[in-house]
Image: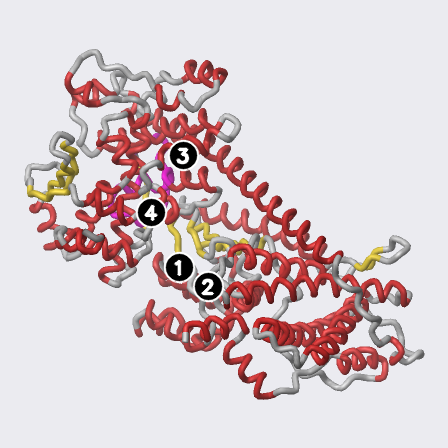
């Protein structure tokens, strides 16, 4: 029986659960077999005597996963207006049924992967905990060290740390499905909480309707694994049969990783057990058996557990980021080696026409004024725009094996390379020897030609339906490499360096000031209301936003046109909300504001979104914003959901928000594809050099082709569409 036929035989609610899981991307072809196999064992019944809303039990003898629900509680929730509550409860329990965390801790009676055999515990008095599973991954030295702390009072509930993670995953997935089914993102608003489990109390944000106190610890654990709070990836991974083994293997590779892992689980175990005691889910007998010294009911102990957990987790976050950095360096080295080999076989370009011959001998040295820097940028923008068009033509001809325009393309290419080199020299503001000029032309050619090769290889893979991961990675690398080179210093034969990007030092100073101001603002907010301001980060690498206070993630939505932006606003806001949030600034907001940030802020408080818009439009009021925003533009090349032109749009948007946000990583001043071509005003005699450069930049003459390019944006997209047809 095929998988779809097996799904059709399941309970209607389970079928709905699978359907929603597919819609939100949790279930896929790789895990659907396991999901269905686990859900085929589920039986649903009613038990109104439950202290909670529902529970799941494993009957291994009958190979059944028995889910019991408290209909009284569900009906009460519906009476209170929560029509979705039954779905939330069932989706939560179904997630337990398919979770590797549940399977390898509760169901198998195996330990919470620390050999805590609760089957023996319930049957015999000679219950022991030998922790043999984690020790299997340890060296002899680690085992000796482990024996010194494993039985500490603050770590003896480590097994429950897995359950905390399991409950977090189950509730997170359940809420995602509910929001998808009811098409309502406002069902689970982000709220501020103050937990009384510890002394002093612990303040945090969460959008979970249940187990909300687990949010800051689960998200920090996730960050310790991946280096980022990638909740969606963690939820997917936790469904794999061998997930816990993979966790051990990952931490095993790090210095003291297994020790930190055990201590993190110990901290989370204390928090989980304390929460269950507070809710009345732990009987006195169970408390005395599992926690004889009542460590978990002491609020001072829980605060110490929180502190220790965060310290150990942060150590592993650093290790995770070091791993990612090493991986990135290896990729770059591999690409540089390959590109170097290709460059060695490439013919040297013919000497280009000496543009400097057109320079009036009486012209003065180019002044370093803001106006002239803008003019330089305008010239480079025109060159970059025409380079984009030329890349499309070269790539299209290569893919289609059309050689009729080779001579034309080569001539245009040589002129562009020469113009780009001369613009860099002009930006440097220093006259250089002709030999150095020719060397600069060749360096620009090396960077651009690598991009040409990468572009055409990627387009070929798309057309032939080959694996594109490597060619796309190379394309992004070459694009970034060219951008960085155009900002780099000009190196002369005598060792002299001429600075081109004069904003580097200013940006560093501004960055330090911005960071200092940011910290000051956050401290001020903390003093005012005793609550931290929202800490929001956009990751260009991951393509999404995250509120660090809570770990709540908002996936990126690519908005390319005004029409798409308006549709996005209508989808996320009612007419009344649009009027309140945007007011008379709707048109300006489409051009200047981060619409996804507006949506994120609105989920928490509509006034926050309104304050953000006004601050961007008016250019003031940043100090009053109830949040901090960081645009992390590092590793943007790894974002596979964004095309080259999408990344350009993103960079331009980020720049428009520089007065209300901190920007780290890639913030390129010169961008390929920045198609804004301002009209150049008539130049004075002293500016004839600029005029000669502008005239030397080849212009697109085929209007019909230009329209086609603008409609389709790039040749790769055209190839995809042709193949589909």
Judging from the image, what secondary structure is the residue with disc 4 in? strand
Distance from Cα at disc 4 to Cα at disc 1: 14 Å
Discs 1, 2 touching: Cβ within 8 Å: yes
Q: Residue at x 34, y 19 (%)?
A: 131
Q: Which residue is mark 2?
A: 612
Of residues 165 and 608, the one nearer the viewer is: 165
Of residues 517 and 249, the one nearer the viewer is: 249
Q: Residue at x 42, y 39 (%)?
A: 220
Of residues 528 and 567, the one nearer the viewer is: 567
| Lower position in the chain sequence, tag 4 or tag 1 | 4
Single out the mark in the foreground, 1 or 2: 1
Distance from Cα at disc 1 to Cα at disc 2: 9 Å
50 above or below 233?
A: above
Q: Which residue is mark 4?
A: 206
Distance from Cα at disc 2 to Cα at disc 3: 40 Å
| Lower position in the chain sequence, tag 4 or tag 2 | 4
Q: Position of residue 142 (x, y in %)?
A: 47, 19
Discs 4, 2 touching: Cβ within 8 Å: no
584 above or below 552?
A: below
Q: Is residue 346 left or right of residue 639?
A: right
- Residue range corresponding to the magenta coloring: 197-218
């Amino acid at each position: 029986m095929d998988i779809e036929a097996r799904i059709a035989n399941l309970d209607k609610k389970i079928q709905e659960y699978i359907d929603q899981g597919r819609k939100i991307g949790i279930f896929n072809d790789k895990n659907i077999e396991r999901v269905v196999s686990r859900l085929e064992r589920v039986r649903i019944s009613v038990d109104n005597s439950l202290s909670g809303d529902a529970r799941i039990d494993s009957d291994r003898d009958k190979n059944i996963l028995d889910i019991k629900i408290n209909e009284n509680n569900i009906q009460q929730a519906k009476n209170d207006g929560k029509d979705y509550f039954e779905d939330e409860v069932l989706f939560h329990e179904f997630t337990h049924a398919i979770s590797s965390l549940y399977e390898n801790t509760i169901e198998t009676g195996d330990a919470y992967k620390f050999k805590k055999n609760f089957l023996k515990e319930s049957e015999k008095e000679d219950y022991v905990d030998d922790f043999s599973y984690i020790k299997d991954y340890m060296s002899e030295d680690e085992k000796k060290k482990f024996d010194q702390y494993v039985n500490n009072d603050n770590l003896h509930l480590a097994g429950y740390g897995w359950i905390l993670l399991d409950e977090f995953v189950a509730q997170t997935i359940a809420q995602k499905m509910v929001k998808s089914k009811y098409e309502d993102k406002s069902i689970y608003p982000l709220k501020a909480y103050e937990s009384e489990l510890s002394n002093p109390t612990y303040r945090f944000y969460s959008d979970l309707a249940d187990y909300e106190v687990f949010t800051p610890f689960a998200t920090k654990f996730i960050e310790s694994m991946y280096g980022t709070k990638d909740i969606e990836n963690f939820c997917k991974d936790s469904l794999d049969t061998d997930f816990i083994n993979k966790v051990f293997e990952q931490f095993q590779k790090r210095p003291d990783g297994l020790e930190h892992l055990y201590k993190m689980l110990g901290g989370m175990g204390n928090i989980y057990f304390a929460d269950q005691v507070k809710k009345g889910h732990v009987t006195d007998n169970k408390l005395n058996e599992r926690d004889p010294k009542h460590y978990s009911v002491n609020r001072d102990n829980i605060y110490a557990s929180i502190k220790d957990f965060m310290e150990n987790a942060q150590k592993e976050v650093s290790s995770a980021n070091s791993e990612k950095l090493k991986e990135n360096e290896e990729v770059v080295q591999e690409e540089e080696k390959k590109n170097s080999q290709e460059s060695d076989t490439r013919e040297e370009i013919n000497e280009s026409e000496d543009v400097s011959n057109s320079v009036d001998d009486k012209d003065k040295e180019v002044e370093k004024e803001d106006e002239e820097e803008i003019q330089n940028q305008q010239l480079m923008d025109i060159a970059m725009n025409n380079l984009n068009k030329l890349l499309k033509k070269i790539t299209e001809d290569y893919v289609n094996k059309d050689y009729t325009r080779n001579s034309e393309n080569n001539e245009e290419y040589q002129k562009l390379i020469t113009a780009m080199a001369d613009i860099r020299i002009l930006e440097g503001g220093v006259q250089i020897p002709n030999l150095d000029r020719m060397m600069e032309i060749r360096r620009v050619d090396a960077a651009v030609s690598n991009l040409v090769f990468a572009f055409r290889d990627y387009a070929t893979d798309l057309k032939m339906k080959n694996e594109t991961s490597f060619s796309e990675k190379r394309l992004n690398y070459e694009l970034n490499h060219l951008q960085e080179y155009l900002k780099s210093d000009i190196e002369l034969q005598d060792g002299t360096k001429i600075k081109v990007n004069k904003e580097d030092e200013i940006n560093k100073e501004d960055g330090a000031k911005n960071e200092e101001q940011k910290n000051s603002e956050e401290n001020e907010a903390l003093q005012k209301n005793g609550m931290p301001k929202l800490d929001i980060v956009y990751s260009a690498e991951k393509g999404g936003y995250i509120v660090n206070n809570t770990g709540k993630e908002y996936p990126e939505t690519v908005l390319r046109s005004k029409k798409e932006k308006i549709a996005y606003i209508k989808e996320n806001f009612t007419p009344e909300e649009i009027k309140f949030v945007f007011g008379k600034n709707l048109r300006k907001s489409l051009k200047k504001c981060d619409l996804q940030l507006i949506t994120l802020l609105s989920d928490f408080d509509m006034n926050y979104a309104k304050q953000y818009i006004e601050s961007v439009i008016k250019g003031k009021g940043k100090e009053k914003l109830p949040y901090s925003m960081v645009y992390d533009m590092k590793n943007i090349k790894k974002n596979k959901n964004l095309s080259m032109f999408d990344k350009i749009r993103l960079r331009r948007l980020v720049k428009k928000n520089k007065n209300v946000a901190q920007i780290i990583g890639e913030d390129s001043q010169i961008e390929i594809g920045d198609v804004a071509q301002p009209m150049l005003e008539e130049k004075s005699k002293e500016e004839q050099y600029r005029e000669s450069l502008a005239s030397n930049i080849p212009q697109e003459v085929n209007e019909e082709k230009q329209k086609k390019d603008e409609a389709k944006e790039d040749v790769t997209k055209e190839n995809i569409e042709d193949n589909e047809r």
